Image (spheres, rainbow, N blue to C red):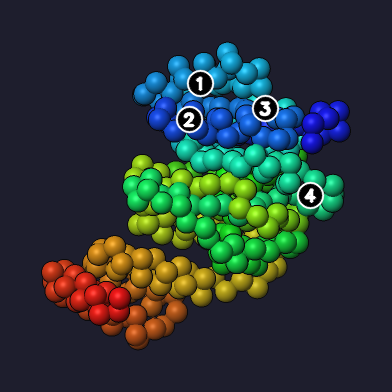
């Protein structure tokens, strides 16, 4: 796709906070897209490293790059500011450390020929910098059309895979800048959007989501709290819209609590896991998890760790 006359402009939204070590690779992956009718909009969210200087150098090298600066306000506010400066009919999101594959936009943009489609996504590889490895998720959780009742149970979209209509972003009010949502503010947006449009996807891994110690998506304890906040906000949003949807909120919160509780056990955060399992029992009565939670809170960590390591050795 190389005829700009027939291509809608895509505004690529990239919030930046102390990202100087990641930006060169990310920017290269976007500027090397086969789909050329793009603009890159960076918002430097109060970085204290050399990100601002680096961004200005990108702007000098390519006229498609636009750079704006603001005091630190969080990723949601930075994305909203960037979108307010966007000229594109479509907007796409990429974090400062994630990567796009060359055909990503070329394969996603044609999906918007269907006027019912408001958002398109794809699969994403997972790169773990501290493990020096790449993981290919199965991309089993994928839905098209009316996806709300699937999406409320699991966020199947990685932020760096999403492309959407700017008009729809504006209609739902963009990202909620509440810092309690940090880490799941994208999920909150997708849920709002899914109430007003259909979703579609390309069944390929066309992006790479990079995990490292500094990014929020590895902080499970914060993500768990943010998920619960997100669910409460969406419940209230439905009430405001007077939309009657039969959503089993308690069961969804229970499933989230169990998922995170197991993750905390795996990471050796036994007391936190105990609290989380006990919380799950409050959503849906579960004597099993209630007692597991209580056990985790009273048994010394050293004994739990020994038992966990022994079990792993025995099951190898």
Residue at 53% from the left image edge and 47% from the top image edge: 208
What whole-number distance in Å separates the C-alpha atoms at marks 4 and 1? 31 Å
Question: Circle 3: is it few (<14), some (14-19), or many (20+) Cα within 10 Å?
Answer: many
Q: Are marks 3 and 2 in contact (CB under 8 Å)?
A: no
Q: x, y percentage for residue 211?
A: 42, 48
Residue at 82% from the left image edge and 53% from the top image edge: 116
Whether 246 is drawn above or below 105: the answer is below
> Which image quarter: residue 269?
bottom left
Question: Circle 4: is it few (<14), some (14-19), or many (20+) Cα within 10 Å?
Answer: some
Q: x, y percentage for residue 299?
A: 16, 75
Whether 31 is drawn above or below 144: the answer is above
Q: Which residue is mark 4?
A: 111
Residue at 42% from the left image edge and 27% from the top image edge: 20
Question: 70 left or right of 146?
Answer: left
Q: Which residue is mark 2?
A: 23
Whether 190 is drawn above or below 85: the answer is below
Q: Is residue 84 visible?
A: no
The extreme top residue here reads 60
Q: Earlier in the sequence, mark 4 or mark 1?
A: 1
What whole-number distance in Å separates the C-alpha atoms at marks 3 and 4? 20 Å
Q: Quadrant of the N terminus?
A: top right
Q: Quadrant of the C terminus?
A: bottom left
**Closest to the observer: 295 or 308?**
308
Q: Are marks 2 and 1 in contact (CB under 8 Å)?
A: yes
Q: Which residue is mark 1?
A: 55
């Amino acid at each position: 796709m190389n005829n700009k006359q027939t291509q809608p402009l895509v505004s690529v939204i990239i919030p930046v906070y102390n990202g100087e070590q990641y930006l060169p690779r990310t920017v290269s992956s976007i500027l090397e897209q086969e789909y050329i009718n793009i603009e890159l909009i960076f918002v430097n969210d109060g970085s204290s490293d050399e990100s601002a200087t680096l961004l200005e150098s990108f702007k000098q090298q390519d006229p498609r790059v636009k750079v704006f600066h603001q005091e630190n306000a969080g990723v949601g506010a930075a994305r909203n500011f960037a979108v307010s400066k966007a000229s594109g009919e479509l907007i796409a999101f990429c974090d400062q450390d994630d990567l796009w594959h060359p055909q990503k936009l070329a394969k996603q943009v044609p999906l918007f020929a269907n006027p019912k489609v408001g958002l398109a996504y794809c699969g994403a590889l997972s790169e773990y910098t501290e493990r020096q490895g790449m993981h290919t998720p199965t991309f089993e959780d994928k839905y098209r059309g009316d996806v709300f009742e699937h999406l409320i149970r699991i966020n199947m979209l990685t932020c760096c895979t999403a492309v959407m209509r700017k008009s729809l972003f504006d209609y739902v009010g963009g990202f909620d800048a509440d810092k309690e949502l940090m880490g799941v503010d994208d999920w909150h947006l997708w849920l709002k959007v899914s109430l007003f449009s259909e979703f579609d996807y390309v069944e390929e891994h066309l992006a790479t989501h990079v995990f490292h110690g500094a990014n929020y998506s590895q902080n499970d304890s914060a993500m768990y709290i943010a998920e619960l906040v997100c669910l409460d906000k969406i419940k209230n949003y439905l009430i405001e819209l007077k939309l009657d949807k039969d959503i089993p909120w308690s069961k969804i919160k229970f499933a989230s609590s169990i998922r995170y509780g197991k993750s905390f056990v795996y990471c050796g955060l036994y007391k936190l896991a105990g609290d989380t399992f006990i919380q799950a029992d409050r959503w849906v009565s579960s004597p099993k998890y209630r007692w597991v939670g209580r056990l985790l809170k009273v048994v010394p960590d050293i004994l739990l760790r020994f038992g966990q390591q022994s079990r792993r050795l025995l099951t190898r």
